[in-house]
Image (cartoon, coloured by chain):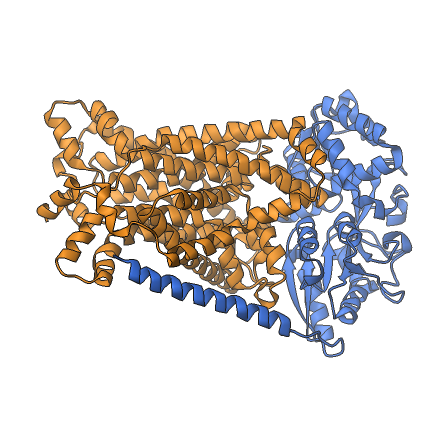
Chain colours: A blue, B orange
Amino acid sequence: MIREDLKRMTKFGLIALSTVLAATVLVGCGSSDEQASDVTELTIYSGRSEEFIAPFFAQWEEASGIKLNIRYGDSAELATQILEEGSNSPADLFLSQDAGSLGAVAMADLFTALPEDVATTIPAEFIDSNRYWAGVTGRARVFAYNPNLLKVLPISITDLTDATYKGKLGIAPTNASFQAFVTALIENKGSAFAEKWLADLKKNDVRIYPKNGAIVEAIDKGEISIGLVNHYYTWEISEALGRPINAKNGFFAPGDYGNLINVSGAGILTSSKKYKAAQDLINFLTSEPIQNKFVEQTHEYSLIPGAAAPVGLPLLADIGAPAIDLDTLKNIKLTQDLLVKVGLL
Amino acid sequence: MPVVADVISASQTPSSKRGLASPNFALNSAVALVLAFTLLPFIYIALRAFEKPLPEILDLLLRAKTLQVLGTTTALLLIVVAVNIFFGTLMAAGLHFIRLPKAHLFILPTILPLAIPSYVFTYTWLALIPSMSGLFAAAFILILTTMPYMLLAILVSLRRIDSSLIEVARTLGLSRTAIFFKVVLPQIRSSISAGALLSGLYVMSDFGAVSLLNVETLTVSIQNMFKASYDRRAASVISILLILASIIFISFNEKLKDSTAKENISKRLMAKNTRINNSGLKVVLLLSIGIYTLLAVVIPIYVLISRFIGNPNPIDFARLTETAISTISVAALGAFIALLISAPLGLLISTHAGKYSRFAERVILIGHALPGVIIGLALVSLGSKLGPLYQSTLLLAFAYALLFLAKAVASMTSALQLVPSTLKEVAATLGKSKSRVTTSVVFPIALPSIGLGTLLVFLTAMKELPATLMLRPTGMDTLATQIWSYASINRFNDAAPYALLLVLIAAIPTFLLSVPRNPGEKVESYQ
């Protein structure tokens, strides 16, 4: 009975849909490459949160006259998205929270190499060996602890498997920076060592948290007395709660893998036609005044040799970070398998 | 009217469908087109998964960890669905049969939790009980989150049960309990199954609650594989497992459905004396509504408001407004697209139920179990080849329609099944043209349920996160992405106004959902 109407409705629907599809294909073919000289907009995929990075982007927009279209997201998810987009990615630049996500994009050959005159302030150890990406800020792995609850501080990560820390240590195994640290451990001490250490942690009733922030909050509340986190979370939680918290940062003995320095960093995508502008943005982010601002505002480390450290923390050079190749931090598959094997993931 | 009602209930024979013996070509092709779209995520998963060599796939599927995760998922699913069926049926029956003044005002708070995303639920409960974690905590949160699906489904079908049967049972001297089990339950079985289906599929695809409470379900595994190892192939293999699990769940669920379910609309409304006026039962009902509202509405909103008040930072009202507007517009567009593309399918399922329509229906339901991140990536994979359409509002709205199509199709189907073919025939014999029959008979009856489905899509789209993060236009925020953005840096105070606004906006359509749709019913129940 309603067949006639149906027929008309569906016919209309089909025509409308095919028109849209055809139009899309046509428009898609029609778009031409933009010239590097008259760039007015740049598209950024930012794994760094808006709250912290937006003021820096705004400053560059004003200085360059170029408008930034910024897509905020989780670093790993944005990396996955870039892998999926491949050569069709609308992004010009990818700014990541950690070296691992940069490594994943680099491994897929989706970054274009940075010329020698880009990121000149950053030492070679914080730049990818193929110059696919450059570090922007330094992030130290530390142990955060509650000074009221913990009087004797650990000297090495191996101390954490002692009975003293039974049920008192918090970790976030799904967190990218924790996994980067385990990756460094595997790469340098071997997977047998890493496996035994992780298994011993588990035996020692290690507490699992979804993320670093939750660990620091738990330390502040006294649920646990110590946790493995990045150094800036004590500030982040204190600022979020609007009060001082019962958590301080501590470093292990020099050279211990618990003192790993990871970086946030940026790379330019091969799909970008606006690499000149993108290079300019990287130069801006790695320039001395902006690096100092990162130290003050986001409490991260400047990567420029000799730069001041965040308040109350040792200089980058004095942390006693283990010598590792940041490039190897992308080998997370093995780490994940290991974490799964010992039952932490 | 009683005459028409008698005609309707007297002639529920399948032979009345004779006039529409075979679906026509246009309808079939329209459905095929919709199916092609809904199959996209499956094609994506298959292509990615089989990039891995077969031994590796089997390895991944059969390792102890995978089986353990499968076990966790199953346990969580069974707990949530069982509790939902039990309490949902009792609460809905209570709300329907027990006489309460302004009954719809009591329904409202039990449906309002639809507006609260599971991750907001979890954050607010964690703020109260920080040590909350594990399977039972996750089950608790997911029961709070999904109960409204159960209640809505059952309430809608209770409104149209054949009350003459209840009256007959009463005159035969059956007790209330006996009437409930023998007369009411058989008539609402298929909506209990629909509610169970929606809550079960929600549990399978949920990421927010389970990840925050340290419960590893299949969806968490999938997300972890992206997050920690950028491994789209392994994630796709686990997705296949999720698809298989949802197929099993859907077929079990179909057993719950009454196989003899028939189109049934009774214009005879509940006679006022069939409402129970027992103060003991009233107390029990009010107590259970009260407890559920306390756990699922009052506590989360209380935590949000206290976070909101305790926020030392100024609120950017311009941004808040702009975010709200874009959230509403894109969710509304998504709901509209879902309505459009569910129409041919709903018509096919309701008028020509057969192998093809059942296949289409199942594909859509299975798609509902997939995590947003998979649908998101499938659309990234395809969409990034579409030039300007990629990361456009239109594509995001389309993603919402795909993600929540099951909700629209389910409502559309039941709505169109509601329209008795005899009624159309009566109208036709009275000399009305075919299109007049559609506009003056079919739509007025089906419209409320179609509206319900559209509103459900709208509500769920507003709180969607993973696909939104990937597919929204660069620079556009939704309330959900803003909540995520603040929560990811532990700024829960700053997230609070966005979460509150989300609840507030969602409360309006929720209110519309809870108001009795049938004016006749309203009058009778208030007398």
Quadrant position of residue A16: bottom left
Left-right relation of A318 to A231? right
Q: Does A90 appear above or below B484?
A: below
B414 lies left or right of A203: left
Q: What percent of the width, then of the height, locates residue A264?
A: 77, 53
- Tell whether A83 sits left or right of B266: right
Residue nearer the viewer, A14 or A314: A14
Residue B426 located left or right of residue A272: left
Instruction: Out of B280 and B372, give the one closest to the viewer.
Output: B372
The furthest residue to the bottom: A38
Q: Position of residue B306 (x, y in %)?
A: 48, 45
Image quarter (top left, top right, bottom left or bottom right) of the N terminus of chain A? bottom left
Which quadrant: the C terminus of chain A? top right
Q: Percent from the top left, x then y, of residue B354?
A: 37, 43
x, y percent for residue B165: 16, 32
Residue B338 in view in this figure: no
Q: From where the camera sits, is residue B150 visible?
A: yes
- The answer to which image quadrant residue B218 occupies is top right
Q: Is residue B98 above or below residue B304?
A: above
Q: How many marks?
A: 0
Establish if A17 lies above or below B147: below
Question: Which residue is located at x 23 percent, y 61 percent?
Answer: B434
User: Which image quadrant is residue A147 in?
Assistant: top right
Q: Residue at x 50, y 53 (%)?
A: B36
